[in-house]
Image (cartoon, rainbow, N blue to C red):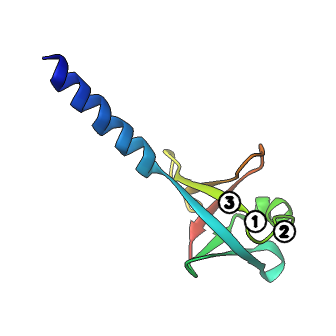
Amino acid sequence: MDDENDIDDEEEGEELDEEIQEVTLIDVEEDGEILVLMDRSRLQVSPADISTALLWLPMSTLEVSQLEEGGVFDLSVILEGTDQQIRARWE
């Protein structure tokens, strides 16, 4: 029975790891409106957060996760090692 709980705990841990995706920023375009990632995917930044994203530098690591409340800008993007967080959506 303990073995089953260990397996459940491991599966939950794996799910949590999948919820937060670490990505590398390679460019900030259109005056902070678009973040271009290493894999060439793009994030559109919430208008309220453009001034924050505009200051982020290439080769920074970002942590991207889905927001529970959803909405148009349904992603949380955190600049690793800081408390800077913005909202965005996949373009």
Mark with earlier residue (2, 3): 2
- The residue labelled by disc 2 is 54
Q: CA distance from mark 1 to mark 3?
A: 21 Å
Mark with earlier residue (1, 3): 1
**Residue shown at the point (64%, 67%) measured from the top left:** 24
Q: Amino acid at mark 2?
A: Leu
Work out which quarter of the rendered image holds the N terminus and state it.
top left
- The residue labelled by disc 1 is 47
Foreground: disc 2 or disc 3: 3
**Residue shown at the point (84%, 68%) measured from the top left:** 54
User: Which of the labelled discs sits on residue 75, or is there none?
Assistant: none
Q: Amino acid at mark 3?
A: Thr
Label 3's element?
A: strand
**From the viewer's perspective, is residue 70 above or below residue 33?**
above
- The residue labelled by disc 3 is 61
Mark with earlier residue (1, 2): 1
Is 25 left or right of 18, judged from the image as shown?
right
Rendered location of residue 71, percent (x, y): 54, 56
Work out which quarter of the rendered image holds the C terminus and state it.
bottom right
Q: CA distance from mark 2 to mark 3?
A: 15 Å
Mark 2 packing: few (<14 Cα in 10 Å), some, or many (20+)? some
Q: Contact, CB < 8 Å: mark 2 with mark 3? A: no
Mark 1 packing: few (<14 Cα in 10 Å), some, or many (20+)? few
Q: Residue furthest front?
A: 3
Q: Amino acid at mark 1?
A: Pro
Label 1's element?
A: helix
Foreground: disc 1 or disc 2: 2
